[in-house]
Image: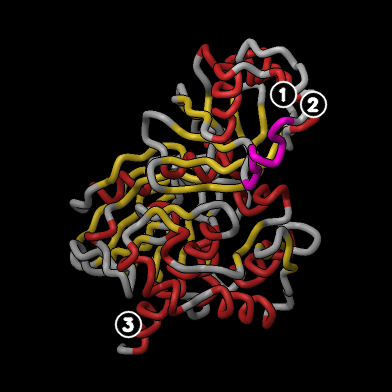
Amino acid sequence: MKNDTIIIGGGASALMLASLLPKKSVTLIETNAKLGAKIAVSGGGKCNITNEKVDASYYLADASFVTPSLKAFNQKSLLRWLERQGLEPVLRKKHQYFCEHSSNELLDIFKKESKKQHIVLQANVERVEKKEGLFYVYTSKGSYQAKRLVVASGGLSFPALGASAIGYEVAQSFGHSIKKTTPALVGFTVQKEQFFFKTLSGTSTEVTMKVGEKSCSGALLFAHKGLSGPAVLDASLYWEKGKVEIDFLPEFSWKSIAGSKKHISSLLPMPKRVTKAFLEAFEIEDAPYHTLTKAEYDKLQTLSCYTFSPAGTFGYSKAEVTKGGVATNEVDAVTMMSKKEEGLYFLGEVLDVTGQLGGYNFQWAFSSAYSCAKEIKGKINEK
């Protein structure tokens, strides 16, 4: 079948692009039986669509690459577009926009919009080639051809939802470089010295984590495998290897409890269960604070700058996104078109652009799709 544009992928960026392009101009190829599988489960089933605060500083990416798209279709533009479709996201967690009831509210919009295009489901892309100005996409359900090819296949996270490396393979087949991919927005596993963390599984506490010069604040959740929670997931975005520093007592002043005769576990602003676990690990008795020796006091103070080296991460099956991807210096920042192959485009997570928690990755998916749609519509109108 021949159409003007083929889109590989059925996630956020692919669906937004299909919605923005003219009717019957797109063939969208998706490996799953349903569109938007990742949208459906994101944000606890309520989909964190975007954030009140959006700029390049919230992304692990080349700022000069992401800024044009983020400005051309920012969070306000996205919210206006959704409102025209009948969806008004609600503000939660201070700055984050979610669907009011469930992710289906967003999915229903995309399903309605996608009906104007040709959708091919449960089709695995096997290979892609270009001949005489046309892209040929060979799949398990036959071959398709078009003037333009958009790779919006996402990354390697959530393999149970159909994630694969096909986007990277297509990029490489056209001479593109791939920046090393790793799981991101994911929990940390721990080494032997921190195995006692596992006894705190299910307990959370507010922290600030530092990875190099980057600070991430929010809840830390002790999990059976190690550490999770928003602060940890954001920290994982910037961690490669080596040490991470955790302030378990952000905004706490040790001077405020100087000379106190209360027991330590009742003084520190952490869950008592957490405090007692650290006291045991530090071999400090839960006694009146003023009885601490200098050595014990110094050891206890490390709770404000606790350092450890993660053993690794929970892996792609638990990662919300994939860090790394198609090198952005080989893609036009305004149009999303390859600098190596005319008519080839890359969107969303398949690129070497990764946002923090808080709706940033969906915003990037929608913004990059908008930039691409503007370029493709201009090409169509040139006919």
The percent position of residue 289, horizontal first and vertical second, equals 73, 24
The kind of secondary structure element at disc 3 is: helix
Residue holding disc 1: 290
Q: Amino acid at mark 3?
A: Lys
Q: Of label 1 and label 3, which has the lower sequence position?
A: 1
- As drawn, 356 above or below 222: below
Which residue is more in the foreground, 6 or 179? Answer: 179
Residue holding disc 2: 261
Q: Of label 1 and label 2, which has the lower sequence position?
A: 2
Label 1, label 3: how many angstroms apart (C-alpha)? Answer: 75 Å
Which numbered dot is residue 379? 3
Magenta stretch in the rendered image: 251-259
Q: Contact (CB < 8 A) between labels 2 and 3?
A: no
Which residue is more in the foreground, 150 or 74? Answer: 74
Q: Of label 2 and label 3, which has the lower sequence position?
A: 2
> Looking at this rendering, what residue extends furthest in the bottom direction?
382
Q: Amino acid at mark 2?
A: Lys
- As drawn, 372 above or below 311: below
The kind of secondary structure element at disc 2 is: loop
Residue 232 is left or right of residue 184, and the answer is right
Which part of the image, by quadrant, shows the N terminus? bottom left
In which image quadrant can residue 152 be found? bottom left
- As drawn, 87 above or below 298: below
The kind of secondary structure element at disc 1 is: helix
Crowdedness near tag 1: few (<14), some (14–19) or many (≥20) residues, C-alpha within 10 Å: some
Crowdedness near tag 2: few (<14), some (14–19) or many (≥20) residues, C-alpha within 10 Å: few
